[in-house]
Every structure is written in C-alpha cells, then in structure tokens.
Amino acid sequence: MKLVLSADGVRLEVSLRETPTAKALLEAAPFEGRAQTWGDEVYFETPVSAKLEPDARQVVEPGTVCFWTQGDALALPFGPTPISTDDKPKLANPCNVVGTLKNFAALKSIKAGTRIRVEKG
C-alpha cells in the first residue's frame, strides 16, 4: 500500500502500514490539502476522521507519517518541533503511525500554504 504526495515539484512516496487509518487514507485518495508548518513538520487536513489507535505515539523518527486525530490531518515530521526535547520530532499530541517516507528531507522545501495532492501510489 502506497500513497504519493505532490507539492510544488516535490514528489514523496509513502509506504503505508496495515492500519485502519492508513486504509481510510488510501480509500479517500485522491484529495488535496494546504500545508501548514510547525518547526520541522509539515501537516495538512484530510477528508479522513479516525480514532486514536493503540500504538499511537507522540515522539517519532524523522520521516514517520502520522495521522493527527484531533485535527484530521496528516503530520509529516522531518526534524524537531517546537516542543521537542532532543533532535527527534515530538508531535503536538499522540498520533496514529500510518507509514514512512524515504526522501523526507524534501519536506524542508514545502512552505505554509502550499497545495499538497495525495494520490494512490
């Protein structure tokens, strides 16, 4: 299961896990959202709503694709956020882990307000 994210010439491939939230995102594709940034994290709203899953986490590795249930948003952390206590991303709240990005360094070039398109991979 894969999703492809496209924004301003950046193309990112998401390898999805087998989770209810990941499946819901795949079923909802294609969709678009507007990027917002928070430290070294890009996030954007989706048409999906999900409940917090048992393995939800707040501190993750860079390149982890997360779903923020409180904002119905995909969160794409690639480095520290304003509440990080070390070099790992710390999300605003525990989030569902839905997949991983290989080339997550490209997220640095995505600015707030950029349109992000999500399609099945």
Image (spheres, grey):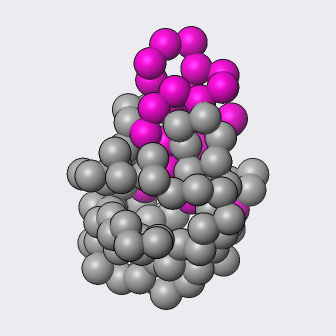
17 to the left or right of 66 = left
Q: How many marks?
A: 0
Q: Which residue lies furthest to the right in this view?
A: 70
Quadrant showing the C terminus? bottom left
> Residue 61, percent across and down?
38, 32
On the image, which quarter does residue 78 sit in?
top left
On the image, which quarter does residue 98 sit in?
bottom left
Residue drawn 33% across the image and 69% down it: 11
Q: What stretch is highlighted in magenta?
A: 72-98
| Image height of 13 relative to 27, above or below | above
Residue drawn 66% across the image and 22% down it: 83
> Residue 42, percent across and down?
56, 51
| Image height of 28 relative to 112, above or below | below
Can residue 102 be seen? yes
| Image height of 41 relative to 114, above or below | above
Q: Nearer the viewer, residue 49 or 36?
A: 36
